[in-house]
């Protein structure tokens, strides 16, 4: 029973007894209770006229960066003897320092402020409305309001830096860039020899070859380097994700995708992102810093999920990606993923798969016994077969054990060889 | 333990003591011992933080005061017991809220001016108790016979007051 009801119940009990027994003493006994009730009613809060403002230093933060929230509550109404302000945090934000609630009293026109620091994991969050409860000092009657202070923050994934990666899409764009375009012209890397044409610079004439053919001259051709279309695909299907306590393989995949996006954009390429999971979250291809921000925001809100339609890669929408462009799929892959990828390759896409290794990730949390060892061996064989199938189709696969830095893993497989290394034909 | 908590337990003991003394002085020897036992339970339970013991305590006190009046126990003792019980009940509630200086910071959040709040609360409660005691005593001493119509009017007023209180509480709890 609430306190006011208890008090009113006792008062009326004594009233009733007074009437039944026609004894005024019962009525007199009820008077202290009535005095208490009246005092609470008299000093109880009027209609609450409060405004609240929540401010953050920025609307985007990097993962694991503490963010400071400042909340100001202003009273435009009458005196509030006790005000309880509570900022209810979204579930994935945990307070690190300071309190998220405050009890104070507010005179008319007075303000109270609350400052606290929270830690956040990657995600896109909307803060809840602020709960305010006001009462008199006896705390018998309360008024509660929910004040809206719309605040949205994006916690972006940490982006590891990558060294130069070598990709070779079948088709490049017209602008100069870092990717070999499979077309002769001006460039750095030797591409071939052709007969001299009027206008060719003399320094390009290959005198050795020309000496063998007295009646004609030959010039060296270099491979043009251009920018390319890169389509990043992040696999957000629940079935391919592995969780280990609070850590999940998907989080590593998100960071890897962010690193790749940043790298390709820094090199001037046109990059798009498709998060393939419960729904299709498509970030239209673009260039530069704005596109980097768009991709990071998309990655901040990426979540794993289940979908009856997108549970296989069969429905990967190829119309989103320009023909013969470079696709980079970040996925632990499932057994059934090879055929759709092979078909994609057959359509002319250059495919690179970054595969965070789910087996080693899961093994770290399992006890070392014979059954686990057997399971590991079986899974490794399956993994090897899948990899072989993909390699046979001309799909590059980079295995990444997530406890190893992403840059290290990717550079070992995709790092660009020095020129002299390629000159002697040792390019991978 | 804070001042409020100490005062709350003291008030509970005072309420039980006043009841027991009132019953004892009225020549009812069977009552004081169980009342004192109940009071002891109330104080111990209150000190150990048993939930709702103070609410049960105030109800029991009101009922015992009513029974006491029926048994011709001195009105002053019953009034004192009821006021002390309400004080204990109120202070227990205050000690549970974050404004109480003895509360753990994690449970309390941040409290601005806890000491001032406690002081203001004790002042308000003291005034309310004083008013209650004075009004109760005055009402008891200045008993007059009312005309039937006045009694009916008072009843209607009480019913209106009840309906207002119910309406207010319903609106607040929505």
Image: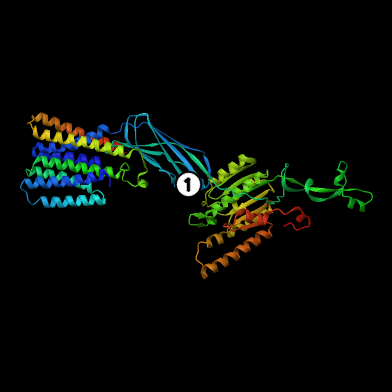
Q: Quadrant of residue A320?
A: top right
**What subunit carries mark 1?**
A
**Point 25% across, 33% down: residue:** A41
Report the residue that reaches farthest toward the left. Answer: B27
In x, y percent, where is residue A28? 13, 36
The quarter holding residue A156 reads top right
In this view of the protein, can residue B162 be seen by the observer? no
Q: x, y percentage for residue A371? A: 51, 69
Which quadrant of the figure has residue A290?
Answer: top right
Q: Is residue A281 left or right of residue A41?
A: right
| Up-down relation of residue B34 to residue A283 (above or below) | below
* Residue ID at (52%, 70%): A370
Residue lying at 54% horizontally and 53% vertically, measured from the top left? A250
Closest to the observer: A209 or A119?
A: A119
Total labels drawn? 1
What residue is shown with label 1? A119
In percent of width and height, residue B34 lies at 13, 52
- The one nearer the camera, A110 or A14, is A110
Q: Residue at x 14, y 30 (%)?
A: B153
Relative placement, left or right, of A20 versus A133 is left
- Say whether residue B27 is visible: yes
């Amino acid at each position: 029973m609430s306190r006011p009801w208890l008090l009113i119940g006792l008062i009326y009990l004594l009233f009733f007894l007074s009437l039944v027994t026609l004894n005024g003493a019962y009525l007199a006994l009820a008077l202290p209770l009535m005095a208490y009730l009246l005092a609470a009613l008299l000093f109880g809060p009027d209609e609450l006229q409060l405004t609240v403002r929540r401010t953050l230093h920025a609307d985007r933060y990097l993962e694991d960066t503490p963010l400071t929230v400042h909340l100001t509550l202003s009273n435009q109404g009458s005196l509030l003897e006790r005000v309880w302000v509570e900022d209810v945090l979204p579930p994935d934000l945990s307070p690190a320092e300071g309190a998220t609630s405050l009890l104070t009293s507010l005179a008319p026109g007075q303000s109270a402020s609350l400052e606290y620091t929270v830690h956040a994991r990657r995600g896109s969050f909307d803060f809840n409305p602020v709960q305010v409860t006001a009462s008199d000092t006896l705390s018998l009657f309360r008024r509660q309001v929910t004040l809206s202070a719309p605040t949205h923050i994006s916690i972006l994934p940490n982006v590891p830096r990558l060294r130069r990666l070598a990709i070779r899409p079948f088709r490049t764009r017209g602008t100069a860039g870092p990717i070999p375009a499979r077309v002769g012209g001006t460039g750095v890397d030797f591409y071939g020899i052709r007969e001299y044409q009027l206008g060719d610079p003399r320094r390009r004439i290959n005198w050795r070859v020309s000496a063998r053919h007295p009646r004609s001259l030959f010039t060296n051709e270099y491979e043009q380097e251009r920018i390319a279309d890169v389509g990043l695909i992040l696999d957000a299907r629940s079935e391919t994700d592995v969780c280990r306590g609070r850590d999940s393989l998907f989080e590593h995949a998100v960071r890897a995708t962010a690193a790749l996006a940043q790298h390709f954009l820094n090199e001037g390429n046109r990059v798009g992102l498709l998060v393939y999971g419960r729904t299709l979250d498509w970030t239209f291809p673009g260039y530069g810093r704005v596109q980097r921000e768009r991709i990071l925001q998309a990655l901040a809100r990426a979540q794993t999920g289940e979908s009856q339609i997108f549970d296989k890669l069969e429905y990967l929408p190829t119309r989103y990606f320009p023909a013969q462009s470079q696709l980079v799929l970040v996925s632990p892959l499932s057994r059934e993923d090879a055929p759709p990828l092979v078909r994609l390759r057959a359509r002319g896409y250059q495919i690179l798969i970054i595969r965070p290794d789910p087996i080693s990730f899961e093994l770290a949390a399992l006890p070392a016994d014979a059954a686990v060892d057997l399971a590991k061996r079986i899974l490794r064989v399956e993994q090897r077969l899948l990899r072989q199938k993909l390699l046979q189709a001309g799909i590059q696969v980079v295995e990444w054990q997530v406890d190893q830095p992403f840059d290290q893993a990717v550079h070992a497989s995709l790092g660009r060889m020095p020129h002299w290394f390629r000159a002697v034909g040792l390019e991978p | 333990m804070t001042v409020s908590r100490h005062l709350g337990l003291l008030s509970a003991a005072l309420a039980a003591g006043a009841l027991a003394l009132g019953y004892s002085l009225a020549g009812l020897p069977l009552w004081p011992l169980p009342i004192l036992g109940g009071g002891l339970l109330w104080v111990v339970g209150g000190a150990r933080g048993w939930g709702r013991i103070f609410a049960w305590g105030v109800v029991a006190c009101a009922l015992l005061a009513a029974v006491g009046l029926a048994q011709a126990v001195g009105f002053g003792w019953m009034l004192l017991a009821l006021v002390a019980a309400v004080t204990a009940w109120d202070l227990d509630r205050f000690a549970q809220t974050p404004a109480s200086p003895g509360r753990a910071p994690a449970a309390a959040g941040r409290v601005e001016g806890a000491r001032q709040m406690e002081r203001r609360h004790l002042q308000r409660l003291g005034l309310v108790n004083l008013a209650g005691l004075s009004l109760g005593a005055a009402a008891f001493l200045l008993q007059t016979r009312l005309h039937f119509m006045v009694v009916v009017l008072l009843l209607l007023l009480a019913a209106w007051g009840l309906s207002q209180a119910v309406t207010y509480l319903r609106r607040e709890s929505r």
